[in-house]
Amino acid sequence: MNKLYWGDNLDILRKIKDESVDLICTDPPFNSGPNNAEYARVDIKERSESCKVYKALNECLSGYDMLLSNAVTGNKGAIRAYLTFMGPRLVEMHRVLTKSGSMYMHCDPNISHYLKVLMDAIWNHSNGQESESFKNEIVWYYRRFSGASRKYRKMHDIILFYTKTENYVFITPKPVYENKLFRRDKEKDIIDKKLDRMQDDKGQYKRIRTKTDDAFLRDVWDDVGVLSLAISERLGYPTQKPSLLYTRMIETSSEDGDVVLDPFCGSGTTLNAAQALKRKWIGIDSSIIALDVTERRLKDKYSLKPSEDYEIVGFPTNFKGVKELANKETKHTILSNWAATRLNLTPSKDADNDSDISIWSLRDKKRSDVRIAAEVKVGKPSPGQVRQLQKFIENDTADIVILITLEPVTSEMRKIADKVEKFKYKGLSFPRLQFWQITDKFFDDPESVYDVLQLPGKLRVKPTKKGDRLFPDIQFDSDIK
């Protein structure tokens, strides 16, 4: 069964069986580092005493210590931390690959040369012998807007292609055929759409765009562009890559039914391509926000439901799991992010990472201008927590504030909320201070949350006795769908 994991990918990778993955396609974030780099280096050194691959890694990192200690660059500390972070993960990725497996590492040119040396150390010394594990440094060339600069404009990424052994899967890549805007008829105001390559009478493809003619056979891929703002595939995720890019990797280096792994799956581009190509997949990410995007992507495109069509691991699946998550962290940022995404909220444009998300938007594009603050408070709820959240309203930072609790709120807290002026939006009124207590009922019926919350475009009215009005301040109109 396909699997989606939330958590530290190093811990999860170490639980995956040896040689159980056929292909790895991943795009790790730059500038990541371990919470405790010193401890991570001690762990690597200890493992190097009994494992040849960790020994090769430890020696490589020691060499980098010497190199970077003499470097003039000001970010040498960040580079060392990043390599300490990536090193053991690369070792585990190598371990889980089958003997016929391959790996594509998508990376920024600023760090690709450092990662290549790490991968050479791990791949080439895994069996105590040199091998031809490195196959290609693929250049993904694209065009995008770039401002004036005192250096050449950055228009490419690097993809490192490695194999576990010489007995690897390699199916001749296929060309990419996309509909392109070809010309506009000004008189009729019609846009003609034609393929990049057209067939002649004999069924042979003839050249239309010379720059893309044989890109699928070269180590410079210039026939797949970056995601434009207008393209339907775009999800708004900051580092999202085009599916066509990963479709090529998966088609070339795996077969039907093979297992594809992405330990930094982000918005789920690798998983999306693997699902379309009938591969099994495993995705891992430490960001609740990223996995929420992945979940919705799989649901919208393939009607896949978590826990039914694929296994989801690490997420709370009941109230007990919520309490366990609350006990693990002190700031409760992760729990707040999980809870907010359950309410169909998405990070506002001003917040795009797990460490700095407090204001959210409705996922509905027609109502994306509504600003919502949603935070979890653990422990017995108190009026002081409500007053603390009122600052979002007083400072005009949020239109609606949702206090999420694990225990019932007090009557005094509700009285404070009732005194706050309503939020007027498109002719409707909404409470500015609202409460949601997480219980097991939510896991049985996720829509039950709208029995207590009132959000634009997402009202749920329970049947009431004749003559009763559930929301007396709200006037319903055609805006509610």
Image: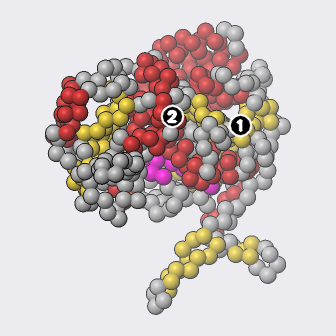
Q: Residue at x 66, y 15 (%)?
A: 55
Q: Position of residue 93 (x, y in %)?
A: 66, 29
Q: On the rendered image, what quadrant is the N terminus found in?
A: top right
> Which residue is tagged 1?
1
The residue drawn where x is 47% and y is 33% is 441
Give the side of residue 67 with respect to residue 204, left or right: left
Task: Give the number of callouts.
Answer: 2
By secondary structure, the bulk of the magenta-drawn segment is best described as: loop
Looking at the image, residue 72 sits to the left or right of residue 401; the answer is: right
Q: Examine the image and state in which quarter residue 168 appears.
A: top right
**The stretch drawn in magenta includes residue 65:** no
Q: What type is the residue that disc 2 sits on? A: Phe
Q: Is residue 240 visible?
A: yes
Q: Whole-percent x and y of residue 394? A: 16, 40
* Residue 329 lies in quadrant: top left
Name the N-terminal-most of marks 2 and 1. Answer: 1
**x, y percent for residue 97:** 73, 31
Element under label 2? helix
On screen, 296 above or below 335?
Answer: below
- Point out the stretch of residues depicted in magenta: 235-245
The residue shown at (72%, 41%) is 280
Query: Which residue ends up furthest to the front in the rendered image?
Result: 466
The quarter of the rendered structure image containing the C terminus is bottom left
Q: Are marks 2 and 1 in contact (CB under 8 Å)?
A: no
The disc at residue 87 is none
Would residue 88 appear left or right of 162 to someone viewing this image?
A: left
- Of residue 9 and residue 245, the one placed in the foreground of this image is 9
Q: Is residue 274 above or below residue 55?
A: below
Quick one: SS at disc 1?
Answer: loop
Tell me: residue 293, above or below residue 129. Answer: below
Question: Residue 443 — which label?
Answer: 2
